[in-house]
Amino acid sequence: MVSEESGLLGKMRGYASAGLISAGPWIITMTGLSIVGLAYTGASARDDTVVSFLALMTYVFSFSLLTVSGLQMTFTRWLADTLYAKNYDRVVPGFVVALTAVAVVQAPVALGFCLWAGYAAELTLALVSLYVIVSLTWVTLIWLTVIRQYERILIAFAAGVGVFWVALHAFRPSGELTGTITAYAVGSGVTLALMIGLVMRGVESARTAEGGAGGTGVAGALGVLRSPWKYPGLMAAGMVYGLAIWIDKYVFWFTAGVEAIPFVWSHPLYDSCFFLAYLSVVPALTINLVHLETSFYEKYRAYYSAILSGFPLDEIDARRFRMVAELRRGATKLLRTQGAVTVLAMIGSGPIVRALGMPDFAERVLRFALLGAFFQVLFLITLLIQLYFDLRKEALWSSVAFLGANTALAVWSVSAGPWSYGIGYTVASLFGAVVAFVLLDRSVARLTYRTFTRHAHSN
Amino acid sequence: MRPQHLVPHASQAGSVDVCLILEGTYPFVPGGVSSWVHHLVTHMPDLQFGILHISPAPDFHEGDLAYPVPDNVRFLQEVFLTRPGTGRSLPRTRVVRNAIEAFWNAIEGLRGAGDPADFRTCVESLQALGRQRLDVQDVMLVESSWEVMLDLYRDEAAHESFLDFFWSWLFAYEPLLNALTTQVPDAKLFHTVSTGYAGVLAAGAACVTGRPMILTEHGIYTKERRIEIHSAHWIKDWLPEEYQVENTAPYFQLFWNRHFEAMSRICYQWADGIYTLYADNVRAQLRDGADVERTRVIPNGVAVERLAEAHARWEAEGRVRDERFTVAFVGRVCPIKDVRTFLAAMRLVVRQVPDVLIRVLGPMEEDKEYAEGCIRFAEQLGLQDHVRFEGRISIADELPRVDVIVLTSISEAQPLVLLEAGALGIPSVATDVGSCRELLEGGAAADRGIGVGGFLTPIASPGETARAVLALYEDPDLREVFGKNMQTRVRRFYDQRDMVDAYEEIYERCIAGDLDGIASAADTAALEADEAAREAALADQMLEDLV
């Protein structure tokens, strides 16, 4: 369970997880926000509470992700290295250290914001708690990959949602907004607690199964905090990518948005269209990630093991070829299935918009958002594959390209006017996807060369 | 602690007369070759020396030097065969590209026949590369180098493990690149004391400076490497554990043998004088491509005068020896000296000579496990009352007390102990390895005419060794005749001063630019005759076997 493969392959396996982990929170965020938003838009589209709640929730997810996204990559790498070295006694202490560090960093951020914005005490408490809980959830997801019990993780989420609904009715009276936030905090707290429990239990049973070192490796666990310095490229890539996804929304919020509650800006139209669009890609994204983890990983592993087992070059080349073919297969499948969904949704944008009570010109924005989300998924998958091959520099440059394009085009779009809403993002994510693809393609063509020279250098 | 006058880099020292190029020896590692170099340098105080020492990696030779470095050594520069690279990509300048191309062309040429022009281009461009201070490892991992490696792989080893090939290629050529990018010092003469990487560096130095270069071989480098490759331990040790390399595949053994043979060939090609200790070695050199015209045998020697004085003192004092018949083993207690065979032979001797005294004289620290094993073996054989393990001793003081010296080594070059014993009039029993036959029975005709100084036995044959020792025990007159023969032989052919004189003359001639006569034609004629006779005998033998 913990170390399915020993040796170098196990190490590379862990590296691959870095990319997957970055997708998880994104998926969860989008799903969560979309569902909540949908649940409310149906009821009363202009309900101020709803708008405020959505805006605050978006803030919580967005900013927590932004600050943690870089760390996620480096923590994941630390965990992979630790497992590879079989220092099982450091896994849980490292987890505790990471949680503590993130909580210590995030709590003041949230508190500072609430105090500066002058929120009431109950709201402040609820918000800070939620912010910290959500941040810790992103960290916990990393350690959950050690367990791989996806069903149990889903149950934990389901439990959280259930508790949320219950708590909603319990807390509602104490003030619409505060009550809702508190309820969500409680629900998320339950999910987090269950997930932490899963991690603790899972690591312990893995440890006894593998016969790893006993005791607690606290000293070694502190290494998790040094990981950003050890892997600055990864940290940068994570941060840049995190920012790149949100930058266009930030631009819209702060230049063309409304202040739902003091200091919380949002652009309801833009935001809703995008959350709907993301919802449309989450299924295909998840399916494709599973495909990466299974079929592609098999071929990827066969390639590296051919090298390590001392096979002749023509066998190594053949396996590389098969690996690339598998990538192509996955890409085609994604393009076909997600493409179909996107096209259908684009066609049905009109009815969707009207059904949700949004203004007419939202139809056009939604259309572009759907297309943009499609391209973004392509970008994300390509990025993940880059990380599978440990192409850190390429990942960073791809993210930078996306960030640059998205920023510039968002600024243009705001000044150009509503007719252009959504176009900027679509073009930017297409650009990002193309850049990522080109960089990946060039590297995979010289993959054997790069693999050997990297190992030669490290020795 | 290095002496003050000794600078760590050749460029800081100015011009020297002789630049010595050494590999894994003086002044870091104690041993026969190092002592020889030390003797040479200290006995030519008017010449200025510099040392380029080839070490495996930085910090490999930590700690104190094994020898006090004389004042006439101006620089001691270490050349590292491996060094960590920076991992940065190289500037794509024309110099770098050309250098890489020249290097790989040279390697291709050298693996075949070896056109000197290729080597010259190669060295010149590598020297230019060295001036740029680029990391050799970075050069090796550039994509064009990778392509060259792929071509080689596809040509020769397309079905072999690619991983093993890659690492072999890296381990074979990175040291060569590191050696040849070393900036050549300003010296009037280059003298290398082995082929291998030192030899290639010396050849490179001769090539770019046009100055003379001479080679002295003690053991034959390629022969030693062949034995190691055959046992294939060291290849595994070089590679990191995660790569389970089974480098014993025939292809890789061939790869490495050819690699070292090519290096020897380069050195022989560029050496103006090719020297070694005894005739058999010359044959090995000729087989590896040396030009017979440039070869010459210059044996080692012993301090004849000092030993003669010691001998005279003993005679004057009335030969106060141990009453007991004394047999001595002189040498390091380590596996290659095969002390166990010696002890087994002594067991047989004790049966006939109940009060024999057996002295094991030599350092026991090199291989403690083996030494302890020998002590236990002696006890098992019941020799406790006869054997004394005495550790390191002074030859001049202790040897005169001995009646017979025994050597049971599995491999030797020119064991000085036979000569030292001979100078003191003591006969020997030795295994027929290296130059032992030449030392005890004589090489050239004049030498053989002097007479025999001891008995030769096959290796690992305690029975034969015992028989020889007993023959000497039973006949004191025979011991005396043998002893006198050896004294004559040593004085005439193995005087250390002659060795130093020979090299002094060679150095002077080379520095003056007069390269005639630094080899010796007379030897070569006899050698060729010898060689022809040998080949004829071998051919006859093969014919017989076939029939």
Image (cartoon, grey):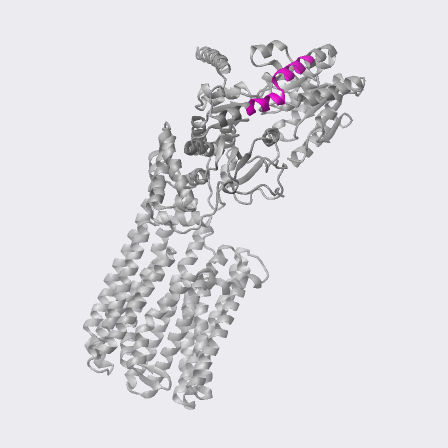
- Percent across and percent down for residue B72 are 59, 35
In which quarter of the view is residue B103 placed?
top left
- Residue found at x 63% / y 43%: B1
Give the residue at x 20% y 74%: A348
Image quarter for residue A249? Answer: bottom left
Residue A315 appears anywhere in the view: no
| Residue B502 lies in the magenta-colored region | yes
A196 vs B197, nearest the viewer: B197
Left of A261 or right of it: where is B69? right
Region rendered in magenta: B484-504
Magenta stretch: includes residue B145 = no
Q: Where is residue B299 in the image (x, y as percent from the top left)?
A: 57, 21
Q: Is residue B6 above or below residue B196?
A: below
Residue closer to the observer: B376 or A148: B376
Q: Where is residue B177 in the image (x, y as percent from the top left)?
A: 43, 39
How many marks are shown on the rendered structure?
Answer: 0
